[in-house]
Image (tube, rainbow, N blue to C red):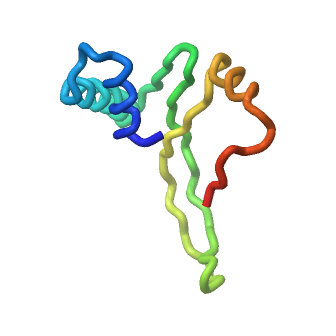
Amino acid sequence: MTRSELITRLTSRYPQLTQKDTELVVAEILGAIQTALAQGNRVEIRGFGTFALIYRSPRIGRNPKTGKSVSVPEKWVPHFKAGKTLRERVDRLPLEPPHTFV
């Protein structure tokens, strides 16, 4: 689901909200998550999951095209861990994947 699909779905589900209001709400929620992560905080949404930062130490990597070694600097990367409710709902899906990802 894309951001615009989420906005469309929320607007149709809650007709009292205009498209502009829904866009603002989605932007505020995502902005709050981004701001919290940028400040080094953790974000927990009960029943959905937790967003946190993971530290990756510097390492020597390999350029897959040339095979040469390259230095990969240290960095913080965002990480999402699904909550129990979300994991249980996803676990009930059929075993055959409905879509092929490229």
Considering only vertical position in the picture, is 5 above or below 59? above
At a point 48% along the width and 51% down the height, the residue shown is 75
Q: Quadrant of residue 4?
A: top left
Task: Give the image location of residue 60, x and y in percent.
Answer: 62, 68
* Number of marks: 0
Task: Give the image location of residue 71, x and y in percent.
Answer: 55, 70
Name the quadrant of the C terminus: bottom right
Q: Quadrant of residue 40?
A: top left
Nearer to the camera, 21 or 32: 21
Nearer to the camera, 77 or 4: 4
Residue 66 appears in the rendering: yes
Horizontal side of 5 relative to 66 (left or right) equals left
Task: Pick out the residue farthest to the right.
Answer: 95
Nearer to the camera, 1 or 51: 1
Task: Give the image location of residue 36, x and y in percent.
Answer: 36, 28
Horizontal side of 89 relative to 78 (left or right) equals right
Q: Quadrant of residue 19?
A: top left
At a point 62% along the width and 69% down the height, the residue shown is 61
Residue 39 appears in the rendering: no
Considering only vertical position in the picture, is 69 above or below 94? below
Task: Pick out the residue farthest to the bottom.
Answer: 66
Task: Give the image location of residue 10, x and y in percent.
Answer: 36, 24
At a point 80% along the width and 38% down the height, the residue shown is 95
Horizontal side of 76 relative to 97 (left or right) equals left
